[in-house]
Amino acid sequence: MPDESTKLSDVNMQTDRQTGRSSPAVRLRRFCRPMLRRHRRPIVSAWASIWTVCLIGSAAGQPAGGRSGGDTGSAVFWIAPAPSPDAEGQTDATHWFAPGILTRTGRIVQLTDRRFEYQPAATPDPVQADAAQADTGRPPADTVVVSAGRVLWARPLAIGDSEKEAVDAFLDEQYDAALRKFVEAIEPRPPVWHQQWLSMAAAQAAGRASRGSIAIELVRQLDRRPLPPMVLGWLPLTWAGRDGLRINQDDAKAASDDPSPLVRLVVASALLRSDRTTAVATLRTLAGLSDRPHVATLAAMQQLRTATPIRIREDHEKLLARIESLPMALQTGPLVMLADKLSAAGAAPQARRLELSLSVVPIGPHPDVPGSLRALRRSDSPPTRP
């Protein structure tokens, strides 16, 4: 069987004479050759992993909600309820209960770090049609625009066999196989927002398969463009002591000065147990990035991992309120962290309450809440929240 460098030698190395730019194949070879020398492993080839990186790089010039290949059909998505005005003094029974997560189907026009735009399905059911009309004041066939922070989960209604196999392998904790299959799922070039999630899921699988350098490289390439909170929620960060991430400390230290804020966030999270001084300094810097609010938010949450048990016990309600003020798509990791810290601080009842909430009514699929991952197999039924 030819090795990975032989595969690369077969790539067409032509230059686009019209633009004067190197073709994707040229950029692929220039970027991948050093990585291939470092990652020749039998189960998951470095070729596959770096192919994912280059796909994401080639998508950087496309519209955020656009497609790089053929239309794969409609998507299903969960949307957090819109913030409601203060209902104090109102007696209407609809204000007595928290609104539930909204389920929608339709064509995603755009999903960026700030904006989610979609066209509802042409023939929605009456409940969905009424809800869309109430949200926008327009007929449901019109484009609907909401904050990207309200998108908890999205997935094409029709997914390929590679993605199904990747999900099965991830659920079975076969992370090498999951990494390979997540890569294969990107090759048909699904919508860019789905490429981003698949690549972040591959980074999670790589981190859990002790392939930290691949996870870091995937994050580095993903950080070339803004990411939706839904994708950032899957960033390979350590949130709890039982976390399954196994990013090598040497790999993390080698990337500690990386220009990518997301890479530095992942590295600081990995180093927080072994090199706290460096990690805390990095998190403090990232928490002050006014031009990267989601990075700053996650860095501030990671800093809470260093909080003392006394602070956790005394301030857990304030910390919980702080977490609940975040975009819902970013809340799961910090909630897992708070539950873990409460348990370690001897506040078992409070910890158990959070753990039950996360397991019974999860916000969305998240790798640190195993029960929530069942939604990866069937995403048209969000959990019912009280």
Image (tube, helix red, strand yellow):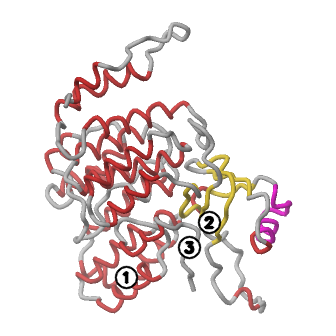
Instruction: Classify residue 257 by image quadrant.
Output: top left
What is the distance, in whole Å, between disc 2 and disc 3 at their CAs?
Answer: 10 Å
The type of residue carrying mark 1 is: Glu
Which residue is located at x 38 percent, y 57 percent? Answer: 165
| Image position, residue 161 (x, y; %) | 45, 53
| x, y percent for residue 385 | 56, 82
Of the two numbered discs 2 and 3 in the rendering, the one whose residue sits closer to the viewer: 3
Kind of element beneath mark 1:
helix
Q: Which residues are magenta?
A: 129-141
Q: Which residue is mark 3?
A: 382
Mark pair 1, 2: CA separation: 22 Å
How far from the left and from the top, in percent, is residue 250?
A: 13, 45
**Main SS of residues in magenta:** helix
Q: Position of residue 227 (x, y in %)?
A: 49, 47
Q: The residue under label 3 is which amino acid type?
A: Pro
Q: Which mark is residue 79?
A: 2
Q: Assess disc 2: are there few (<14), some (14-19) or many (≥20) residues with their C-alpha within 10 Å of its C-alpha.
A: many
Tag 3 or tag 2, which sits nearer the N-term?
2
Closer to the N terminus: mark 3 or mark 1?
A: 1
Which of marks 2 and 1 precedes in the sequence?
2
Contact? badges 2 and 3 (CB < 8 Å): no
Q: Name the quadrant of the N terminus.
A: top left
Q: Residue furthest top?
A: 17
Residue 355, numbered label: 1
Mark 3 Cα-neighbour bin, 10 Å: few <14, some 14–19, many ≥20: many
